[in-house]
Image: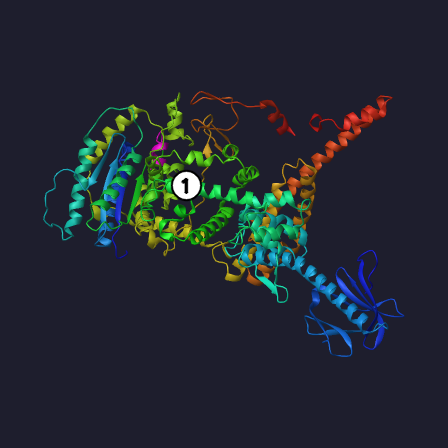
Amino acid sequence: MGSEGCLLVMVIDIHPQLAEADQHAHTYLDACISFANIHLASNVRNTLAVIAANHQETRFLYPSTTEEQDKRQKDGRLELLGLVDDSIERELRSMVVDKHHGEQTESLISGAIGRGLLYIKRQETEDILSKRVHARILVVKISSDTGGQYLNYINNYLSAQKIGTAIDVCLVGSDCGLLQQGADITGGCYHCIHEITELLQTLIMMYQADVATRKKLNTPAPEAVDYRAACFCHRSLVDMGNVCSNCLSVYCKAVPLCTTCNVIFQTDRPLMKIGKKKK
Amino acid sequence: MSMSGEREDILLQVNHVRYKKNNGQLYLSQTRVGWMMDESDTFAVSVMYNDIRTQKISPEGKPKVQLQIVLHDISSYTFHFCNTEGREKQVAERNQVKERLGQLMTQNRRQPPDELMEKKRMLDESEQLQQLYRALVPTAIISVDEFWKEIAGQYKQSLGPQLDVGVSGAFLADVKPQTDGNNGKIQYNLTPEIMSSVFKTYPAVRKKHGEYVPHRMSESEFWTLFFQSHYYTIHTNTRTQNVFSECSKHDDREWNRDVLSTQNDPLFDLDNIYEERPLATDSDLKIGGTKAGSNAMHALMIKRFNQQSLNIIKAQTHSEKEKLLDEIAAKNPTGGGVVANGQPPTTDIDQPKSKKARIEEKLAYNDLEKSSTTETPALTIHQRDRYLTGPTQNTFSNSLHPDQVVRLQEQLDVSVSRWQPTLPNSQDAESATRALHHFSDSCRKGRSAVGVRSGGQLPGNLHKELGQVYSSAGELLRHFWSCFPPRTPQLQEKLHKMHETLCRYHNVTIRPFQEMAINDYNCNSSILDHLTEMFHIANTKFENWKARNSRHYNRAIILGIVVALAHDDCSGMWAKVTTGSWRNF
């Protein structure tokens, strides 16, 4: 709501898990499109990009890469809004129809965030005056497993932090620690809702205002983020652990051999240490 | 105030000195002057030299012979010398006292103020040091000496090396001769500073001084010769075998060397000075330059001036090593062959460097070049999944099988094909109110923490004081932790001392501060939690160390006693046990 517009990049998760309950998919998609409209309508200088991600691909829903047809105003709304709606709907349908068979089961959210960051950068360089673009990324996600994409996520977070882009996260379902860390690193807001019917209201309340305005509003206090690493052997969170200097894998106790990169550690007094602890 | 004999020795005692119409004696000791009445044994007057601003004597014409001491606070003491032997004795005594008093005053004035001035200067320079001083010393948490030894010592080290004061260019000219009008004798007043300047500028003279004085000739003879030599006068008596004639030869040789190196430097453009490249000769005229005019005397003067200036510059820029080499060269002033060996090797290295090499040297910057690529070994990962997953908790609840995913995708396809976006119905009212409830609850929970959040909203004064408390506490803690591990006895002693200091600091400064913060400013009582926690950690560490040490000591003693009892030769075993290794216990 400032004088300068904000570029909102929405990353929408279209994982097939959506189909578990029939009504859910419709509510979900409706909510996302409505929120996109609200964003564009709140400030004439706001701009939008929507990227959808499922387990096979990520795709720009808006601005669409296929040719656009100029539509005439049909229902009394701003033409741009109608354009956005149509574009999103069209691309979504074609995306869902596309089927490949692959091993990947997780949503490619990290890739979508990466594409979003690149889009933001491109907008900045293509601008005639090379103005700094106020941008933020909103991630709406339903599946909570992040699988083997830890490095990708961390790279994205650090790049976003570098260019000053906040990554907001709205999770439907259960908590995800990695996304919570990302929101904390980049200065965004993290929230998790359990009912998909509350999605639009939550989006409006928490994510409508951009980062500068949020400081003036009365928002819920951010919880303490658990940054503890999980050990590689048990996948349990540890406060203090041992880290392999070669591959940076975390172990909860001192091991003579790193099983990830097969490096042997030299320990001088492996037994005395345990003995002393008994005291 | 009595002057006990063992504290200060009496340097001068003068009898028959009157003060306020009473007869008595005047005493001068190391640090003060005192006057005692004849029949008493306590000092009626006792003045420290530091308090004395100046002393005055009565003029020659007056009948009374008096000496007056004026203090800083304008008060004064007047002593009347009334020796029965006559006026000359009185005057002599008075002058003696005056000279001695003057000496002792300057002596006493020089030492302490310097230290005090330096300390004051250090405190003025560093705001942080001043704050630490104010926080720790007046409250007797740490004694003054300890402060200056430990904390200021570290600060001084961080300042870096001090620069020396250089030699003034006019030092020889400053030696103004005084003429005694009658017999044309010229008197030069030499101070130690002038002598050290001469030694710094002319290392050859220093060598000569070391050789000749004091066995061959006295100081005054040496310096007389010096001023008669070529260094100071233009007309030298070449007839006499002068001490400094060797020096002059050495100086000339050095001068030629320097001039050659300047002339042969390919990067200098000297075409303006020399119309043609001069040959390296000893002729003063050629080296002085054709523009110096044809007068040989002028050229000589100019050469002497240049020599002196060059020597002064060299005195400042020479490093210790080169000074040593110069002294070696000065030791062998005769014979070209010997000098060649003693010459500093730098000139030989400089000469062959060609112009091109010099220019390239100036053009190339190491840090602008491409950094050399270091060979990095490749990282071989044997378990890719673990590496890519990273240190995250594995939630196995939602992992889906690819077949399941395919099935779900079919379902999604069907669902989306049936989907018609109905935006006006995208949010129903009930869910909206529920979401709003949740949102308000979480907002209210965030606001419920009453009191001042630490760090964010403290009032200005409290903020500053808190900063100061943290900085002084931090300094003490830093010294405490630097004592670990306490391997030497000094470190152990320092550790004990630091622990006591910390306890004192805790009681004197931290508790009152906390109480003040709570009472006056209505703050959260957790404002100093972090600081008190640091103190507790330090305390526990100290207690553990003490317990462990004493346990070792006790064990050693017990074992020693047991072993000694078991053997007849107690003394030998005891010695062995106590000097054994502690770790074995």
As drawn, the residue found furthest toward the right would be B39
Magenta region, residue range: A145-155
Judge left or right: residue A125 versus residue B565.
Answer: left
Q: Which residue is found at the position 30% from the left and 41% from the top?
A: A140
> Could you tell me which secondary element the residue under label 1 belongs to?
loop
Asked which quadrant contains residue B524, the reply is bottom right
Q: Does residue A152 show up magenta in the picture?
A: yes
Towards the viewer: B554 or A279: B554
Asked which quadrant contains residue B15, the reply is bottom right
Towards the viewer: B485 or A95: B485
**Percent from the top left, x then y, of residue A185?**
39, 43
Residue type marked 1: Thr
Chain letter of the residue carrying label 1? B
Judge left or right: residue A124 versus residue B251.
Answer: left
Q: Which residue is found at the position 63% from the left and 25% from the top?
A: A275
Q: Does residue A265 show up magenta in the picture?
A: no
Quadrant, the C terminus of chain B: top right
As drawn, the residue found furthest toward the front would be B239
Residue A168 in sight here? no
Quadrant, the N terminus of chain B: bottom right
**Percent from the top left, x then y, of residue B217?**
67, 47
Up/down of A130 relative to B186, above or below: above
